[in-house]
Image (cartoon, grey):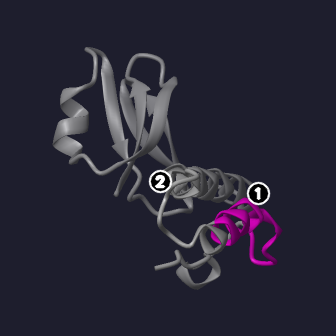
Amino acid sequence: MNTYTVYEVSTGKIISSGSSSDSFEVIENKLSQGQAILRNETPINEYYKVQDGQLVATPLSVEERNIKTANENRIKRNLLLKDSDWTQIPDCTVDQAAWATYRQALRDITDNPYWPNLYDEHWPTQPE
């Protein structure tokens, strides 16, 4: 899954951000003229601002880093919920109770004592 941010080069205004199973090349081909993509593979202690039409890395404060991390984790949580919506259809043949528990754990992830600095082991595990 590739996470990315689309921004307008002339102003630095963020147009959108998200995750996609598409390659970055496919994502970049969908951009309008004057837009660029920031691959969110950057170190968590940096953010980018536009300077002379280019993105420039700038250090983040601890508070800014936590906000950025929380936003990224909310995006991940929302995608996991969306990807598991199908499990709650009435005639679905999966263990709906187990999936409902998993989905509730995703909704409650912000109550985790490590929030927003979660590692993989802090995330709930999908039922089989």
Which residue is outermost to the bottom?
121
Please name whichever residue, 106 or 94, is drawn nearer the observer in this view of the structure. Answer: 94
Q: Amino acid at mark 1?
A: Glu
Residue neighbourhood size for the residue with mark 2, other residues' Cα within 10 Å, grouped as few (<14), some (14–19), many (≥20): few
**Magenta-highlighted stretch: main secondary structure?**
helix
Residue in the picture at 46% in, 42% down: 18
Which secondary structure lies at badge 2?
helix
Residue in the picture at 37% in, 22% down: 9
Please name whichever residue, 55 or 97, is drawn nearer the observer in this view of the structure. Answer: 97
Q: Earlier in the sequence, mark 1 or mark 2?
A: 1
Q: Amino acid at mark 2?
A: Asp
**Residue hosting label 2:** 83
State which region is magenta: 100-115
Q: Position of residue 90 (x, y in %)?
A: 58, 52
Could you say which quadrant of the image residue 113 lies in? Answer: bottom right
User: Is the N terminus in the top left, top right, bottom left or bottom right quadrant?
Assistant: bottom left
* 104 within the magenta span: yes
Left or right for 12, reference 119 = left
Residue neighbourhood size for the residue with mark 1, other residues' Cα within 10 Å, grouped as few (<14), some (14–19), many (≥20): few
Residue in the picture at 37% in, 42% down: 38
Asked if 48 appears above or below 28 in the picture, the reply is below
Q: Position of residue 88 (x, y in %)?
A: 59, 55
Left or right for 104, reference 93 = right
Which labelled disc corresponds to residue 63? 1
Asked if 128 appears above or below 47 in the picture, the reply is below
Please name whichever residue, 30 or 124, is drawn nearer the observer in this view of the structure. Answer: 124
* 112 within the magenta span: yes
Q: Nearer the viewer, mark 1 or mark 2?
A: 2
Left or right for 55, reference 95 = left
Please name whichever residue, 126 or 55, is drawn nearer the observer in this view of the structure. Answer: 126
Tag 1 and tag 2, C-beta contact below 8 Å: no
Which residue is outermost to the front?
91
